[in-house]
Amino acid sequence: MQSRILTRLRAVPADQWNALAGDYPFLRHEFLVALEDSGCVSARNGWNAQHLVLFDQTGLAAAAPLYRKSHSWGEFVFDFAWARAFEQYGHAYFPKLVCAVPFTPASGPRLLYRPDLPAPACREALLRALREQAQVQQLSSVHALFLDEAGRGACAADGWLLRRDCHFQWYNRGYRDFEDFLAAFSAEKRKKARRERRRVLEQGIEFRTLDGTQLDEQLIERVYAFHAMTFVRHGHHPYLNRAFFSQVARDLGTSFLVKLALSAGEPVAAAVFFRSADTLYGRYWGAAADYHSLHFETCYYQGIDYCIAEGLKRFEPGTQGEHKIARGFEPTLTWSAHWIADVTLRRAIGAYLEREGSAIEAYASQADEHAPFRKGEPQRPP
């Protein structure tokens, strides 16, 4: 295979790239190109695209979404302490290479390959090429974030350092409807969930589910404004701009979803989701005012309703938030892998990750004790 670095994903035809990415929405050609076209991802803002692609005699064979980063913002795997350690030892941590989806803490494939090719050989070739790029560019490290199980195994076999974190995810255990889901809760937790849903109804709020094919520019404007408002309220600028929302809604179509909350027919809140054939991903949320329990209903309960109705197996609602536990989301380990060029610092980071990993697993175990499900009864398999 011949390797190349692409600074614009449009250099690869969408059908060839998507043959590798499958239906995972965040690595679809349409999603990544929308980030680049809108300027959300650019060398100017520290996300310098350097997508790694491998070609064989029949065309695009394997690929990895790759960025040369001058900072660690927008990654959701926090390595600021590592950067300080490098500086203390007189080494430059930045720039670094990051194999990830910008601003998207959702687990999925990172080492892509054509389905007719042997997966282990393709992953091995990609990892070797990633390491070679770091060495050629004389960079400190390569980081593969939010890996799926296959990618994690390949990185472990290649000697990368593994790091774990704990997110909260929902699993469809064959529920017939939302009440069937609540039936697995303890009486107290079930009562609380019903009360939260009832309070939203009592405020006269209704919901519409719209995909990218059903959204006009006026509605996209409202959805984006809600999203941006959430960032501003927390003292931040949104990573994504208005142009990205329009392009990704149009180009991803039915894989882009909005739950729109309406009061007297007027939009008052919205949650944005993406979906694959079996998974729903919660991404962005915002509201015009503070409505009781509306965040829980829009971002979580409406998503669970959708998954049950559509037969989706899993729901990733985003990062953080222990409040998700009481609403039926279960602690789940997520993984990243790290190749550190300097041997001494690699050993130090490896020792740190062993200690951190034990703490993360203990935290996940403790969080599981607070799940709302009735104790002592076996859960249905997901």
Image (tube, rainbow, N blue to C red):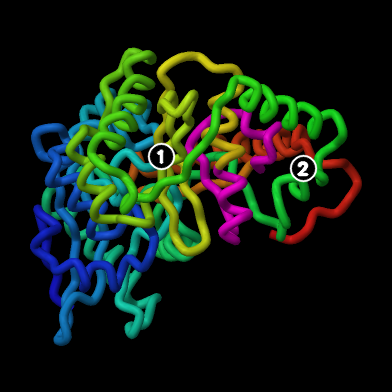
Does 322 lie within the magenta span?
yes
The disc label shown at residue 149, or none? none
| Above or below, comparing residue 276 to residue 322 in the picture | below
Q: Secondary structure at mark 2?
A: helix
Question: For the point 52% across and 61% down, which residue is it?
Answer: 278
Give percent across and percent down for residue 335: 48, 49
Give percent across and percent down for residue 56: 17, 82
User: Outermost residue, front direction?
Assistant: 264
Position of 305 compared to 73: left or right?
A: right
Crowd band around label 1 with a 10 angstrom C-alpha radius: few (<14), some (14–19), many (20+): many
According to the picture, the residue beneath numbered tag 2 turns out to be: 182
Position of 177 compared to 257: left or right?
A: right
Question: For the point 37% across and 82% down, which residue is it?
Answer: 118
Give percent across and percent down for residue 364: 66, 38
Dot 1 amino acid type: Val
Q: Quadrant of the N terminus?
A: bottom left
| Above or below, comparing residue 69 to residue 59 in the picture | above
Q: Earlier in the sequence, mark 1 or mark 2?
A: 2
Question: For the point 21% across and 72% down, which residue is it?
Answer: 15
Dot 2 amino acid type: Leu
The disc label shown at residue 272, or none? 1
Position of 325 compared to 56: left or right?
A: right
| Above or below, comparing residue 104 to residue 239 in the picture | below
Q: Quadrant of the C terminus?
A: bottom right
Give percent across and percent down for residue 131: 24, 58
Q: What range of the chain is rendered magenta?
A: 303-330
In this rendered view, identify the residue nearer to me: 140 or 375: 375
